[in-house]
């Protein structure tokens, strides 16, 4: 699993990110406080606190693919992997 933080502070960013998440061949989740939602769900994303960066979890070990898909939303270019 790859983890990082993304900035989704506008409706357009949320729409685009959700569309990208739907097209990924792996699952993408957003985590805010105690909530974890599927990033392909617009309603799920809008249920989160979007004022601050949100943790993203991608169920993939392919760093290049994840960065290519969601790189424009990353708060920091650092992506970590967890077991």
Image: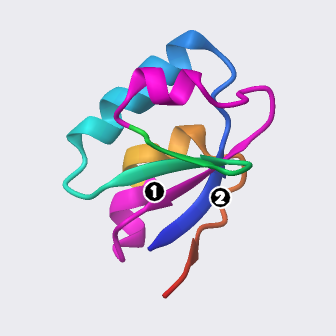
Q: Is residue 21 above or below residue 16?
A: below
Residue reaching furthest to the front: 34
Mark 2 and mark 1 in contact (Cβ < 8 Å)?
Answer: yes
Taking the magenta stretch, the answer to whether it contains residue 77 is: no
Position of residue 69 measured from the top left corner of the image (x, y, whole percent): 37, 47
* Residue for badge 1: 67
- The residue nearer to you, when weighing 49 against 69, is 49
**Location of residue 47 (image quadrant):** top right
Residue reaching furthest to the right: 52
Residue ID at (65%, 58%): 77
Q: Is residue 14 left or right of residue 20?
A: right
User: Residue 77's mark?
Assistant: 2
Taking the magenta stretch, the answer to whether it contains residue 56 is: yes
The span shown in magenta is 40-67
Element class at badge 2:
loop
Residue ID at (63%, 28%): 8
Residue ID at (48%, 29%): 44
Circle 2 Cα neighbour tier, 10 Å, few/some/many (<14 / 14–19 / ≥20): few
Position of residue 72 measured from the top left corner of the image (x, y, whole percent): 54, 39
Position of residue 49 measured from the top left corner of the image (x, y, whole percent): 73, 30
Question: Separation of disc 1 and disc 2 at Cα?
Answer: 8 Å
Q: Is residue 66 above or below residue 53?
A: below
Residue reaching furthest to the top: 11
- The residue nearer to you, when weighing 17 against 32, is 32
């Amino acid at each position: 699993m790859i983890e990082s933080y993304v900035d989704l502070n506008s409706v357009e960013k949320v729409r685009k990110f959700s569309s990208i998440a739907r097209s990924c061949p792996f699952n993408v989740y957003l985590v805010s406080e105690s909530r974890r939602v599927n990033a392909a769900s617009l309603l799920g994303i809008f249920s989160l606190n979007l004022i601050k960066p949100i943790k993203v979890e991608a169920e993939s070990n392919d760093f290049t693919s994840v960065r290519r898909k969601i790189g424009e939303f990353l708060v920091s270019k650092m992506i970590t992997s967890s077991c």
